[in-house]
């Protein structure tokens, strides 16, 4: 079974929330405005595992809080993730024609509109967080701080920059770790930690959840590297380059066990299932 099937209720809630957010925006009788909305919705509807927003909702569940309390965080991280994919696919980046079996955004709507769609998703994520938590300013401030840090220069964007600019002689082991922690791990971590803040987790609960999310982000990258490894064309930032496939598989198992143990004191069956699913996908 897929994650979407195991967590059907949570994924359906996420799907409904992200689609209606833009569908409910005001309609203006201008072709540029309508094309922008269509472009945004096209990429949101292309599909995907909804992995990051699912983590946000499962964090609420682990804390015994209503899923809706973490739903704005779930929407925001999915908007940011989707924007990053739109921009990654552009000719100036990875220059991809397809994503998940469908034409990429810029192949359908043009490069300029794809760029604006990504901009809209990024900006809208912070609008919705400010709007959703404006009655609790302390929560709003910390959630926005966590997510903007994870998405910015010391997070996803910085990691992407290091990924595309390969140092002479290749990436060192330390630099590979930086790329993974920032490009992939930061947004996974904040999907959990920002949801914990939104759900008013205690300091102990938040620390446990942050540790879980840090380890899960690493485990996710280890699994990706194993899944994507091609000995004839190795990626410059693959962990396997430094330690081989067998050692990476052993490390994935070790990190996953630590990840599950980190939330042992919480009612975190869903979060543990996600960690196990990531392990078993390779």
Image (tube, rainbow, N blue to C red):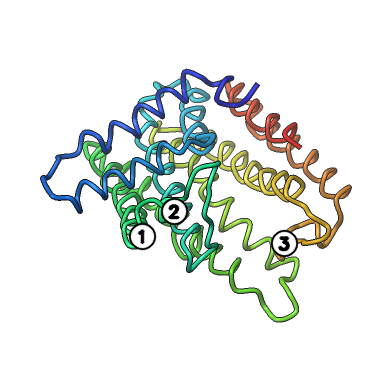
Along the viewing direction, whichever of 143 and 226 lies nearer the viewer: 226
Are the residues at dot 3 and dot 2 in contact (C-beta closer than 8 Å)?
no
Q: Earlier in the sequence, mark 3 or mark 2?
A: 2
Give the residue displayed 47% in from the left and 18% down from the top: 9
Neighbour class for label 1 at 10 Å: few (<14), some, many (≥20)?
some
What mark, if any, has residue 86 been given in the picture?
2
Percent position of residue 25, x then y: 19, 39
Neighbour class for label 2 at 10 Å: few (<14), some, many (≥20)?
many
Residue matched to label 3: 235
Neighbour class for label 3 at 10 Å: few (<14), some, many (≥20)?
some
Give the residue displayed 68% in from the left and 35% down from the top: 278
Please determine whether, in this image, residue 135 is positioned above or below residue 58: below
Q: Is residue 18 left or right of residue 229?
A: left
Give the residue displayed 83% in from the left and 57% down from the top: 231
Spatial CA distance of label 3 from label 2 is 21 Å
Are the residues at dot 1 and dot 2 in contact (C-beta closer than 8 Å)?
yes
Percent position of residue 53, x then y: 47, 35
Residue matched to label 1: 115
Return the residue found at the far left: 29
Element carrying mark 1 = helix
Q: Quarter of the image holding residue 249?
A: top right
Element carrying mark 3 = loop
């Amino acid at each position: 079974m897929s994650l979407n099937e195991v967590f059907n209720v949570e994924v359906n809630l996420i799907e409904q929330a992200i689609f209606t957010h833009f569908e409910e925006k005001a309609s203006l009788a201008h072709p540029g405005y309508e094309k922008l909305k269509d472009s945004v919705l096209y990429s949101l509807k292309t599909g995907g595992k909804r992995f990051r927003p699912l983590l946000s909702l499962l964090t609420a569940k682990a804390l015994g809080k209503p899923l809706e309390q973490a739903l704005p965080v779930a929407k925001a991280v999915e908007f940011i993730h989707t924007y990053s994919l739109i921009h990654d696919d552009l000719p100036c980046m990875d220059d991809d024609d397809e994503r998940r079996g469908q034409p990429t955004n810029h192949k359908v709507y043009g490069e300029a509109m794809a760029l604006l769609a990504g901009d809209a998703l990024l900006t809208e994520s912070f609008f919705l967080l400010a709007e959703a938590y404006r009655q609790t300013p302390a929560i709003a401030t910390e959630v926005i701080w966590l997510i903007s840090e994870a998405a910015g220069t010391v997070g996803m964007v910085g990691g992407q920059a290091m990924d595309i600019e390969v140092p002479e002689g290749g990436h060192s082991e330390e630099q590979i770790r930086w790329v993974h922690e920032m490009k992939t791990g930061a947004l996974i971590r904040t999907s959990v930690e920002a949801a914990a803040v939104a759900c008013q987790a205690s300091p102990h609960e938040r620390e446990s959840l942050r540790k879980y999310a840090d380890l899960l982000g690493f485990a996710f990258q280890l699994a990706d590297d194993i899944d994507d490894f091609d000995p004839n064309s190795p990626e410059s930032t693959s962990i396997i380059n430094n330690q081989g496939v067998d050692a990476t598989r052993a490390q994935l198992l070790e990190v996953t066990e630590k990840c599950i143990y980190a939330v042992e004191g919480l009612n975190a069956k869903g979060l543990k299932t996600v960690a196990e699913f990531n392990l078993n996908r390779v």
